[in-house]
Amino acid sequence: MTTQYIPQPLDTGKVELSADLLELTELLARNTHEVWAQQRLAEGWRYGAARNDIEKLHPCLVAYEDLPENEKEYDRNTAMETLKVIKSLGFKIEK
């Protein structure tokens, strides 16, 4: 079976996030990294200066604040898009 997968995420281009939700984005990004790292460690991965799938080494198995900015941005984008989808579906997020 050969089918070409074409991602079709919800359009969140017009969704604006308040300052509070932008702050929440950073907290969610940090937690996203923590969940990812916890899962990797449970699977036997450990820190390595370069990624090596055979030896299960990964350079991002560090605290969130020690991640390279591009890795933090990946987690931030995931968190931000999640919040935007929640809002675009009509849900409200309140502190």
Image (cartoon, rainbow, N blue to C red):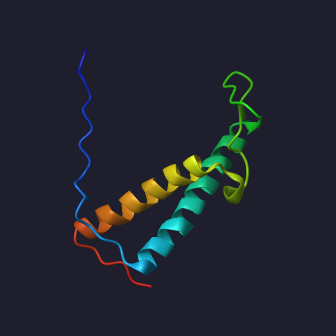
Query: Which residue is at a point 37% across and 65% down the rendered structure image?
Result: 83
Asked whether, in this view, residue 55 is left or right of residue 78, the answer is right
Side (left or right) of 92 relative to 22: left
Tell which of 4 and 66 is nearer to you: 66
Q: How far from the left and from the top, in percent, is residue 69?
A: 60, 51
- How many marks are shown on the rendered structure? 0
* Place of residue 29 in the rendered image (x, y in percent of width and height, measured from the top left): 54, 60
- The single residue placed furthest to the front in the displayed view is 69
Q: Which residue does the image show at 22% across and 72% down from the upper left?
A: 90
Left or right of 38 in this view: 91: left
Residues 82 and 74: in front is 74
Above or below for 51 versus 17: above
- Which residue is the extreme one toward the bottom? 95
Q: On the picture, is 87 further left or further right than 93?
A: left
Q: Where, by quadrant of the figure, is residue 87 drawn?
A: bottom left
Quadrant where the C terminus sits is bottom left
Q: Which of the 4 image quadrants contains residue 55?
A: top right
**In the rendered image, the vertical position of residue 82 relative to residue 59, given as above or below:** below
Quarter occupied by residue 60: top right
Give the x, y percent position of residue 75.
Answer: 52, 53
| 58 over 52 or under it: above or below | below
Q: Position of residue 26 (x, y in %)?
A: 53, 66
Q: Quadrant of the N terminus?
A: top left
Point 68% across, 30% down: residue: 51
